[in-house]
Image: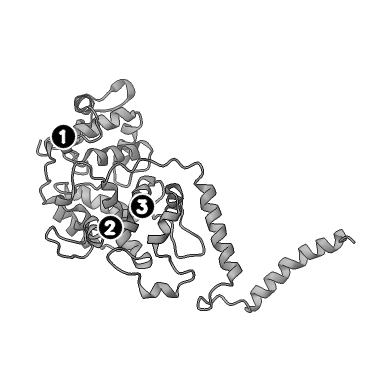
């Protein structure tokens, strides 16, 4: 016994038409209350796990050797993830238990994924669920910080979580999430991946916040935070941080990446004309300079190095003169990046 080709072809033609008719009829419920059939639930989870596994095969995992990665991610987790997935400081919202599928409690789930798999879940999101992609493309550095945070999440205590997310004052009083949760000068140190905003010009801060609001400067963390700010709020925040004095880094905090301060100073003052690299100080921190050029002195070396790499890769922009920095950073070597970061981190803030 065999199936004739004409019957097979007819079946292939009729099946999708029948499927479309059933969908059009409205007989298939899309309500979340009844849940999926067991086979549908299994198939969707199996497909997701297989997709993540395959996508992560060639992913190179960076070292999680900077504990400040956790602070960069913790506030974003509290603002965007904790409602659905819970945290050491609060349970999941009752609303999520009516979602299909129900967002998982991450404590038992995180250990079942590799770092590379967690990266792809966080960066790409998951279709047919409420799990969104990372808010900004080309910010793998932020995604890896979230992976480092998630890796610690299952064993994290509530007090430690609040401290990382900026939900507690130094005295232990619980506070609401806000700009100071990340940018408080007392929370920053020589390994911070979060910038100091203190003492920047209000013009630069306004343009930067506006760039995040418009999506012209990529940051999944910042774009989520500034969403909905009014022009008056942007101006108020800019004035607040412009008037704040910047904390001076301790001597042993200024060069955690090991760059050469001397080589960095030479490049900052003289540039390297042979490689079309201008002197940084020909624009930055001049007494009569353009207020849209940020002050670099006293920022942490890891933050400065990360921003230089983003400029070099043409992924940092948004303000009026960002194209100048993209061009200037284009020919920087990895050593140049670390040397410049070391020099400006060590440089006197008030010079």
Would you say the residues marked 2 and 3 are in contact, meaning their CB atoms lie under 8 Å apart?
no
* Spatial CA span between label 1 and label 2: 28 Å
Residue drawn at the location 40% of the way across and 46% of the way down: 138
Pick whichever of labels 1 and 2 is earlier in the sequence.
2
- The spot of residue 27 in percent (x, y) is 63, 79
Label 2: element kind: helix
**Horizontal arrangement in the rendering, residue 28 relative to residue 350 (left or right):** right
Residue beneath disc 2: 75
Residue drawn at the location 27% of the way across and 62% of the way down: 229
Q: The C terminus lies in which quarter of the figure? A: top left
Q: The N terminus lies in which quarter of the figure? A: bottom right
Residue beneath disc 1: 346
Label 1: element kind: helix
Q: Can you name the residue that lies furthest to the right here?
A: 1
* Spatial CA span between label 3 and label 1: 32 Å
Residue beneath disc 3: 151
Q: Is residue 211 above or below residue 271?
A: below
Image quadrant assignment for residue 333: top left
Q: Does residue 285 appear in the picture of this structure? A: no
- Closest to the observer: 17 or 81? 81
- Closest to the observer: 142 or 323? 142
Residue drawn at the location 26% of the way across and 59% of the way down: 161
């Amino acid at each position: 016994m065999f199936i004739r080709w004409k019957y097979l072809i007819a079946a292939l033609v009729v099946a999708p038409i029948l499927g479309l008719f059933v969908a059009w009829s409205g007989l298939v419920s899309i309500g979340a209350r009844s849940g999926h059939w067991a086979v549908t639930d299994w198939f969707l989870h199996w497909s997701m796990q297989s997709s993540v596994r395959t996508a992560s095969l060639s992913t190179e995992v960076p070292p999680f050797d900077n504990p400040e990665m956790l602070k960069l991610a913790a506030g974003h987790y509290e603002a965007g993830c904790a409602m659905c997935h819970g945290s050491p400081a609060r349970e999941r919202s009752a609303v999520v238990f009516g979602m299909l599928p129900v967002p998982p409690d991450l404590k038992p789930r995180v250990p079942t994924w590799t770092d590379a798999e967690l990266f792809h879940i966080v960066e790409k999101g998951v279709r047919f669920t409420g799990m969104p992609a990372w808010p900004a493309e080309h910010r793998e550095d932020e995604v890896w910080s979230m992976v480092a945070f998630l890796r610690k999440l299952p064993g994290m205590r509530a007090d430690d979580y609040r401290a990382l997310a900026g939900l507690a004052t130094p005295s232990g009083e619980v506070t609401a999430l806000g700009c100071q949760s990340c940018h408080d000068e007392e929370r920053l140190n020589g390994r911070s991946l979060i910038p100091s905003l203190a003492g920047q010009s209000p013009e630069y801060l306004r343009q930067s916040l506006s760039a995040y609001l418009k999506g012209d400067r990529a940051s999944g963390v910042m774009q989520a935070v500034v969403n909905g700010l009014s022009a008056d709020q942007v101006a108020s925040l800019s004035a607040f941080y412009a008037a704040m004095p910047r904390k001076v880094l301790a001597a042993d905090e200024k060069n955690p990446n090991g760059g050469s301060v001397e080589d960095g100073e030479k490049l900052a003052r003289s540039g390297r004309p042979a490689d079309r690299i201008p002197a940084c100080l020909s624009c930055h921190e001049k007494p009569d300079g353009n207020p849209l050029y940020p002050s670099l002195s006293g920022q942490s070396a890891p933050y400065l190095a990360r921003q230089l790499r983003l400029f070099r890769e043409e992924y940092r922009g948004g303000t009026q003169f960002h194209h100048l920095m993209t061009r200037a950073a284009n020919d920087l070597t990895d050593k140049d990046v670390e040397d410049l970061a070391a020099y400006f981190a060590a440089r006197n803030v008030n010079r």
